[in-house]
Image (cartoon, rainbow, N blue to C red):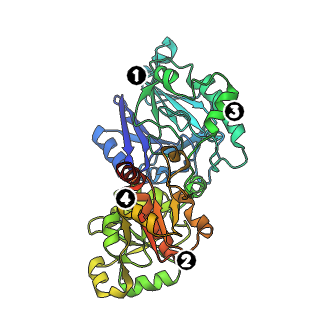
Amino acid sequence: MLFNQYYLECLSHASYLIGDETSGRAVVVDPQRDVAEYLAGAEAAGMTIELVIETHFHADFLSGHLELAKATGAKIVFSSVAETEFDSMGVADDERYLLGDLDDDPVTLRFLHTPGHTPESLSIVVYEHASDIEAGRAPHGVLTGDTLFIGDVGRPDLLASIGFTREQLADMLYDSLHDKLMPLPDTTKVFPAHGAGSACGKNLSTELVSTIGEQKQTNYALRAPDKTTFMALVTEGQPPAPSYFVYDAILNRKDRELLDETEMPTAMSWDEVRAALADGAMLVDGRTPEEFAQGHFRQAVNVGLEGRYAEFAGSVIPSDVDIVLFAEPGTVLESKNRLARIGFDRVIGVVDRPYETMIDHPDEVQIASRLTAQAFVERLRDVADLQLVDVRNPGELDAGAVAGSINIPVGQLPGRVDELDVAKPTVVYCAGGYRSSVAASVLRERGFVDVSDIIGGYGAYADAVQTA
């Protein structure tokens, strides 16, 4: 059996290539949208991809099922309860699929309907040989999608599940875990679709593989004594879902334009960029917060490419606007493709000769105020009417917060700007300084003049106070 796990750190996303080495037949599960690595992996192994299987309609990324189907001729597979606007094959609960002739005892997939995170959620039990099922031998593993994570379970409250309440989905999730997944042998390996950092849960591990037995012992949700307790546990304290989640969950059901991951964005002069911005486009600057602070175009929103670029761009940029990129040379194609991974395809161009263009238009450039923790402590003392904005998630506030600050998670900031006074001097902070640069740039783009963020975030502030 060929079994490859691919992990995309910037979206905490795991996908899989599984094949039978005798028959050369393979499947891909939950692919990212830029699919070149799956094609390369299959070619290197001498495999033909014949199915693209989705465990559910993903909300946190735009899946590559259409791109892979076009490139390979593979069929797209969902649970039989899913409805798609493109050709797809539905699989029933407990249906089996052999990756070869039965006489050759091939790799076999067994599909389980495991609703809860979403109504159409699917898990895939993988057997190295078809005979393992009849002989009662343990499977190699189970691909659990977003039903069961390592250390957590899929949240049941995402708006992707239109028409169901979070309580209804939590009820389904409990039954799926206890009736379908937990009865699998304890040695069965668990391969989820996401890891730590994903907003699809609140307690995901950094580990990328576990076992059913380990999860029974250590996963807080599986250790809940009854369904009522379980439902309370999994519905409380979830991080805010980025605003693009509903957009992606709907788009993953639709037929749409395919991504050409080799196509470069158009280079635009400053006059062309300025005209696009006047028509409602947004300028996304992918440099680090430190580089952005040293000089940037006034209208730019800073989302650093070195961080969770697509996730935070999708949290603060609307899905229905044109985007112009400001990118370091050599990162333009990566910037475009990472936005495409969440379905943000309206990248109309990139600033041509970015640094020369800033030099040529100094009146369009500004620096950003970033405060050391000590400078922030002094400003707290010296400025009586300072407006403090904490852009961390609610669960992070357990570590403490600056007295008098208002908590607006960065993904909620565009919709809650009216809660702030545009005329007040404002300081934004997060845990380390990446999200605060995003948020401060959003406020400047919205007309706030005196905005700073804290280098090192709340942790640096807490250390400064402790050592003062």
Q: Amino acid at mark 4?
A: Ala
Considering the numbered disc 3 on the image, is that residue within a helix, a strand or a loop? helix
Q: What number is the disc on residue 423? A: 2
Disc 4 and disc 1: Cα gap in Å?
66 Å
Q: Are marks 4 and 3 in contact (CB under 8 Å)?
A: no
Q: Which residue is mark 3?
A: 171
Considering the numbered disc 2 on the image, is that residue within a helix, a strand or a loop? loop
Disc 3 and disc 1: Cα gap in Å?
41 Å
Image point (37%, 84%), residue name: 270
Front of the two marks 2 and 3 = 2
Q: Are marks 2 and 3 in contact (CB under 8 Å)?
A: no
Question: Which sits in the foreground, 150 or 26?
Answer: 150
Q: What number is the disc on residue 104? A: 1
> Between disc 2 and disc 3, whose residue precedes?
3
Place of residue 353 in the rendered image (x, y in percent of width and height, measured from the top left): 28, 79
Could you say which quadrant of the image residue 248 lies in? bottom right
> Between disc 4 and disc 3, whose residue precedes?
3
Place of residue 385 in the rendered image (x, y in percent of width and height, measured from the top left): 53, 70
